[in-house]
Image (tube, helix red, strand yellow):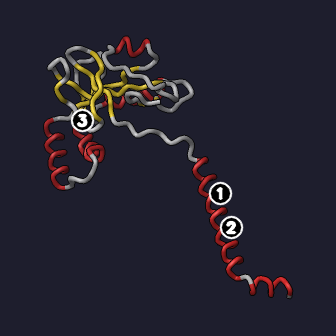
Amino acid sequence: MALRDTLNNNSAVVTIGAVATLVIALGIIVWTQKGSRGPVRNVPTEKYFYDVQAKTLYKVPIDTLSPSVAPSGGEGVEAYVMTCEDSCKGADLSGMTAEQVAEQGFFIAYLERMTENARRELEKLKAKNPNVSVGMYHMEAMINNQFRTVNSERWVSQNDMRFRQLQEQLMNKCPGKRYPTRCFPGQK
């Protein structure tokens, strides 16, 4: 009974103790859950484009649509730069050719550009939903995009068997890894 009387006579202290215990418990839960997700990755603000005329990589803002005008004045298209490593090591591969990129331990998996039809569709989507990110629009329009490797002159659609074969080759390129890591400029 003495404990009950003490608790009843000191209700403010009991309330403060209960709240403090609850806050500590919530802090422990949040801390342990945060640790289980692994490191937080930086969201890229830039991506690589390939200057088709100069045959080199260059950086553009992440929301730049492909194709665009390259530094040489020719066509610039999105380049999927990848590595078999888990980290991109903060590398900046701007100005490098495919061979120089390979010497650094990376590779240009493929190039991508939008068809005129895809660009028109994207513009329609943006007009309807101006607050949605370009990345979301890009996913919608990607069905009409074209792809090729650095060593090929022929663009193919996503539904083309050659693009499917390229995707299959990428899945087998890195021993012990399901798919290569895509790298963005300065990404760790």
The label shown at residue 21 is 2
Choose mark 3 or mark 1, whichever is in front.
1
Rendering quarter of residue 63: top left
Rate crowding at label 3 as few (under 14), some (14 to 19) or many (20 or more) other CA atoms within 10 Å: some
Relative horizontal placement of residue 48, taking residue 37 as reference (left or right): left
Residue behind mark 3? 64
Pointer 1 with pointer 2, Cβ within 8 A: no
Relative horizontal placement of residue 84, taking residue 5 as reference (left or right): left
N-term mark: 3 or 1: 1
The residue positioned farthest toward the right in the image shown: 2
Say what amino acid the circle numbered 3 marks. Thr
Rendering quarter of residue 185: top left
Image: 122 above or below 186:
below
The label shown at residue 28 is 1
Relative horizontal placement of residue 78, taking residue 12 as reference (left or right): left
Which SS class for mark 1?
A: helix
Say what amino acid the circle numbered 1 marks. Ile
Query: Residue at left 31%, top 30%?
Result: 161
Q: Observer-nearest residue: 158 or 36?
A: 36
Residue 32: give x, y in percent of width and height: 63, 52
The label shown at residue 90 is none
Say what amino acid the circle numbered 2 marks. Thr
Work out how far the residue at label 1 is from the one at label 2, CA to CA, in angstroms.
11 Å
Which SS class for mark 3?
A: loop
Residue 136: give x, y in percent of width and height: 29, 47
Work out how far the residue at label 2 is from the one at label 3, CA to CA, in angstroms.
50 Å
